[in-house]
Image (spheres, grey):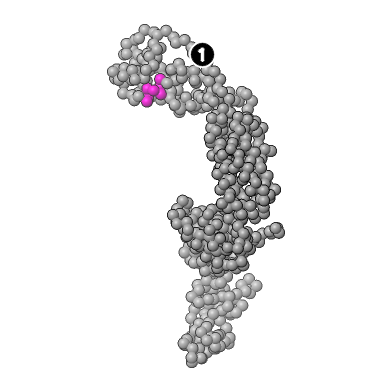
Amino acid sequence: MFLLLPHLAGVRVECMDVRDGHVVIEASTLEDVPVSCPGCQTASGRVHSRYGRRLADAPCGGRGVVIELSVRRLFCDNGDCPRVTFAEQIEGLTCRYGRRTPVLQRMLGALGVVLAARAVARLALLFGIAISRMTVLRLVMALPDPAWATPRVLGIDEFATRKGRRYGTILVDCETHQPLDLLPDRDDLLPDRDADSVAAWLREHPGVEIVCRDRAQVFADGAHTGAPNAQHCADKWHVWHNLGEAVERLVSRHRALLRDLVEPAPAPAPERPAPEAPELAPLTELVEDGEDTPEPYPQGKFLDRLRDTHAAVRAQVEQGLSLREIARRLGLGRNTVRKYARAASPEAMLHGQWQNRTSKLDRFKPYLDQRMAEGCTNLARLHRELQERGARCSYSTLRDYVRPLRPERSAAVDSPPMARPPSPRQATSWIMRHPDHLGEDDQQQLKILLARSPGLTAAASHVRTFATLMANREGDQLTRWIADVCADERCGGLAGFAAGLLTDLDAVVYGMSTDWSSGPVEGRVNDLKALKRSMFGRAKPPLLRKRLLLTAASRRPQTVTAR
């Protein structure tokens, strides 16, 4: 039995039984074993009395285990000790005021670190253990923090506890990828508090040689204050992201060139001659005839848009384009494009939900058709005439019905719409991505765009040069690149980015010259977000800190290559 329950080796097991689905173990402490007083450490074997303790233990065989233990209360024979009596404790089995064994405590604490408290409470019920979520949280908070040494390479970044309102700071050892600490929250209106907290932490833990961070000024100030001799390393991804933002602002100034990349729409079909106006029948006869001839489908914006999109999709399908390419050109989902491509006509996509629906214009549609045949397309006049004849329809209802019947609208419906021009962000991705990673169509459009704009051509050349410097770790050439960009008058949009690099030049040069980055910090921020979501965003920073540190410590250490 002691092989399965080694923590019972120090007691006498009297019997075992199953009661109410639990395994009940009755045991008592040994009589002839002296116990040290917890106050003065004097050994005593003089028994005052006995009392019973009920301890919950780790489950066994899918059943909860309860230990009913009889323990001794002993006299303290040291007259100078303030304790007169004390209760004995069994190592590995009991603790003061504890109702669970240390084995169960460690098990529940480990589950509380991995899972949320409510999940642990529900899972414990399956093993016959009754515990509340607040008890699980207390067990987690009572666990000691993992040990760590002062890092040589420290990563700093911020995380949002309430996006746009409150932020905290995370510190990570970039060599071992171990999170070290979470600094207190700060209000977004008081950014200096972050700098002060970072500086205080660095002063308390001297020995940091390299500080990896983004280009936020608050972390730069705090690191310079707390560790003045440390080398700063600006994260390469953030530098590249800032360059992309500058390129996007430059591309946004050339929206007219982006619109020119779209092929012009085909010429509209010639207008058909309007039929001769028939003799206007009395209104009573029109009403009687109109009741038996409902519209096959309603007129309005929805059907107009449906017909336009169906015509555009079918036209490109007939050209042999793939569904993915059509979806990219029209800005639609691939499943939506597939639905339009399979439909033989726009009306086939309605599935009858708008067929034969009543309208306030049903009685007056024959009259409207005759007036439109006569050439009257003035909506205000038609609306006024209908009101004089007793119609109670709104102006927008009449407009949606008459619009498809107008000659100019009919011509527009017959021709498919123009494809959507590329957005500035899409054009920016063409410039920022490697040429080998672009499709043939993207390469062709980028070539046409650069041929029409010397400024974008110069910007693309500078971006390629910057990417080469970053990929080859040639940070010492960055000063020359900045000078070339500032001297180039064709791409003034990049001059501001280049000038901004001068304010943090040492950190940017070092970041582009080494392999160190804020990647491990960003990974721990993602872990922190996952922990927040698992607790539905209700966890306070102390609990987030405890779970993050303990979760990372439970993982296997990662092998880090020498730099």
Image height of 498 relative to 450, above or below: below
Image height of 66 relative to 337, above or below: below
Looking at the image, residue 499 sits to the left or right of residue 369; the answer is right
Q: Is residue 398 magenta?
A: yes
Quarter holding the C terminus is bottom right
Residue 309 lies, in percent from the top left, at 52, 27
Label the magenta part by its dominant secondary structure: helix
- At a point 48% along the width and 12% down the height, the residue shown is 272
How many dots with numbers? Answer: 1
Q: Which residues are magenta?
A: 396-402
The one nearer the camera, 451 or 414, is: 451
Amino acid bearing label 1? Pro
Q: Residue furthest front?
A: 487
Can residue 35 be seen in the rendering of this structure? yes
- At a point 50% along the width and 21% down the height, the residue shown is 413
Residue 25 lies, in percent from the top left, at 55, 74
The one nearer the camera, 418 or 99, is: 418
- At a point 56% along the width and 31% down the height, the residue shown is 258
- Name the residue carrying label 1: 270
Q: Is residue 455 magenta?
A: no
Label 1 SS? loop
Quarter holding the N terminus is bottom right
Residue 323 lies, in percent from the top left, at 61, 31
Q: Residues within 10 Å of mark 1 (few under 14, many from 20)?
A: few
On the image, which quarter does residue 144 sit in?
bottom right
The one nearer the camera, 316 or 85, is: 316
Can residue 441 be seen in the rendering of this structure? no
The one nearer the camera, 182 or 365, is: 182
- At a point 56% along the width and 39% down the height, the residue shown is 492
Residue 58 lies, in percent from the top left, at 57, 68
